[in-house]
Image (cartoon, rainbow, N blue to C red):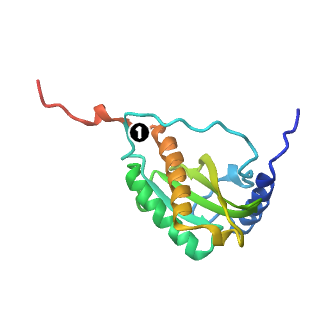
Amino acid sequence: MAKTKARPSQRRFVGVAAAALGCLGLASCVEAASDAAPETAFAQEQAPIAKRDGVSLAAATVAIVSLEGAPAVVGDDFRQSLARQFATHEIVAADPKKARYLLRVYLAATSAEGGANLEYVVDVYDSRRQRAARLDDGVGVNGSGDAWSLMSTSVIESVAGKCADDIGAFLSNTPEAAPVAAQALSYVQ
C-alpha cells in the first residue's frame, strides 16, 4: 500500500494534536472503548460531508463537552463565536445530559511560512457515547509572531463559521434531521 506524504502543516498539527490528545484523557464525559487510541486529525483523508437541504436540525441537539488546545482567552472567544454560529446555522445547543450529540473540540495554532494556521478537530459522539464523526479544517493567516497572537476576532469567527458548517452538515445527515415539510402538521381534511 502506498504511503502519502503529509504536508508540513499537517505534520506540525499532528504533533500538536497528538500531544494534546495524549494529555487529555478522554474518559471524563465521553467514554468509548473503540476510541481508546483516537487517530490523528489527518490520519484518514475523508470527503467532506455534504449538507442535506430541507431538513430541520432541531431534534439533533448538541453540547460542547470540552474545548482544548487554545489559551483560555482564545478558547472563550471561540466558544462564544461558535455559539453565535450555531444560532445562524439553526444548530440547537442543549445541556450535555440531554443532547443527542456531544462535541469535543480541539484547536491548534501552528506557525507557517508568512503567518500561522488555526485548525480545529471536532469529535462528535452519539447518544451511546460512540464517536460518530471526526470533523476538521482550518484557516491560514498572514503575519509574524506567536501563532496564537495572530488569531484576531475575525479569524476566530471564520474558523467558528467553518466548524459550524461542518457540524451542521453532519447533523443534517443524522436520523434526527427531519424534513421540514414533515414537521408542519396539516389540519385540513
Left-right relation of 22 to 140? right
Estimate the x, y position of residue 38 in percent, counting from the top left: 72, 53
Left-right relation of 37 to 101? right
Left-right relation of 169 to 117? left
Q: In this view, which residue lies farthest toward the bottom?
A: 72
For the residue marked with disc 1, what is the amino acid? Answer: Ala
Quick one: quadrant of the N terminus?
top right
Left-right relation of 2 to 162? right
Camera sees residue 105: yes
Estimate the x, y position of residue 162 in percent, counting from the top left: 54, 50
Kindly identify the residue that appears in the image at 58 percent across and 59 percent down: 104
Image mark count:
1
Estimate the x, y position of residue 173 in percent, counting from the top left: 49, 37
Quick one: quadrant of the C terminus?
top left
Estimate the x, y position of residue 122 in percent, counting from the top left: 60, 54
Image quadrant assignment for residue 145: bottom right
Kindly identify the residue that appears in the image at 88 percent across and 34 percent down: 2
Neighbours of disc 1 within 10 Å: few (<14), some (14-19), many (20+) = some
Helix, strand or loop at label 1? It is loop
Residue picked out by circle 1: 177
> Who is closer to the viewer here, 77 or 35?
77
> Who is closer to the viewer here, 160 or 58?
160
> Who is closer to the viewer here, 164 or 25?
164
Image quadrant assignment for residue 150: bottom right
Kindly identify the residue that appears in the image at 59 percent across and 59 percent down: 105
Q: In this view, which residue lies farthest toward the left?
A: 189
Camera sees residue 26: no
